[in-house]
Amino acid sequence: MDFELVIFDCDGVLIDSEPIANRVFAEQLARAGLSMSVEDIMQRFVGRTRNGCLALATELLGRALPKSFPGEWDAALFEALRQDVRPIDGVPELIQQLEVPFCVASNSTRERMRISLQASGLLAFFAGRMFSSADVLNPKPAPDLFLNAAGSMGAAPGRCAVIEDTLTGVLAGVAAGMSVFGYVGGAHSNADALQAAGARIFDDMKALPMLLSRRAQEPGAIDA
């Protein structure tokens, strides 16, 4: 394995949080007067920052959200994550067998990452190696977050592997000059879109060590 660093996205890659987060967001939006299905929310909001989600929700609602909305959304989401979030299948075993340094870089807030990783039993693996969109001027799909993570971890961008599940994240990794692997084992991932954006796609975390050892391969069919 000739990578210097593996950079994981958090939601949908390390933890199975997207169904939980989108259900809670749908419930909170309905209370504010904006009725959307969980499927619609996944199509429109996945991959955005917290502030980006709030801005888009305001646009769709056609008026300002209640002032209490951000705090109530955070409280409901964090409680749901503490109760229900689990690691993606195969992730704990994968992390323990990686032979190179790794970190997590997410458009989520640092508090949401900490709560999610702690609830899923993964926090100890990423202590001191968590990077948030709050750390940079421009979140994904800009390359800033991944470049900041690589710089902080002492790795050259061209020797970094990014593990993503959204088009936003794949575009960010490609723009950073990194090798991107698109995980499509989750319900919301679009394999065709991730592959077209430059990711090598796979649908089983147990396949990732082998893929990382075959860096020269071009993006292609799903690996299992």
Image (spheres, grey):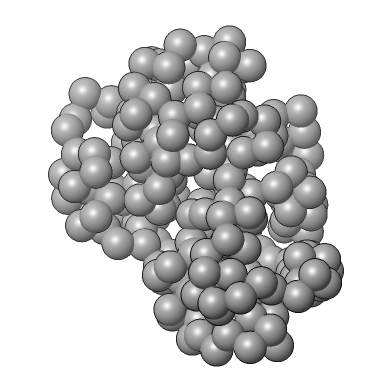
Q: Position of residue 131 (x, y in %)?
A: 65, 33
Q: Is residue 149 left or right of residue 196?
A: right
What residue is shown at x 64% (from left), y 49% (from top)?
108
Q: Nearer the viewer, residue 63 or 34?
A: 63
What residue is shown at x 40% (from left), y 48% (from top)?
168
Q: Is residue 12 visible?
A: yes
In the image, farthest residue toward the front = 63
Q: Nearer the viewer, residue 123 or 56?
A: 56
Q: Is residue 203 above or below residue 129?
A: below
Q: Is residue 94 visible?
A: no
Q: Position of residue 88 (x, y in %)?
A: 55, 58
What residue is shown at x 52% (from left), y 64% (from top)?
56
Q: Is residue 180 left or right of residue 18?
A: left
Q: Is residue 131 left or right of residue 123?
A: left
Q: Is residue 1 above or below residue 170?
A: above
Q: Quadrant of the C terminus?
A: bottom left
Q: Quadrant of residue 190?
A: bottom left
Q: Position of residue 57 (x, y in %)?
A: 56, 70
What residue is shown at x 54% (from left), y 77% (from top)?
62
Q: Quadrant of residue 82?
A: bottom right
Q: Quadrant of the N terminus?
A: top left
Q: Nearer the viewer, residue 94 or 126?
A: 126
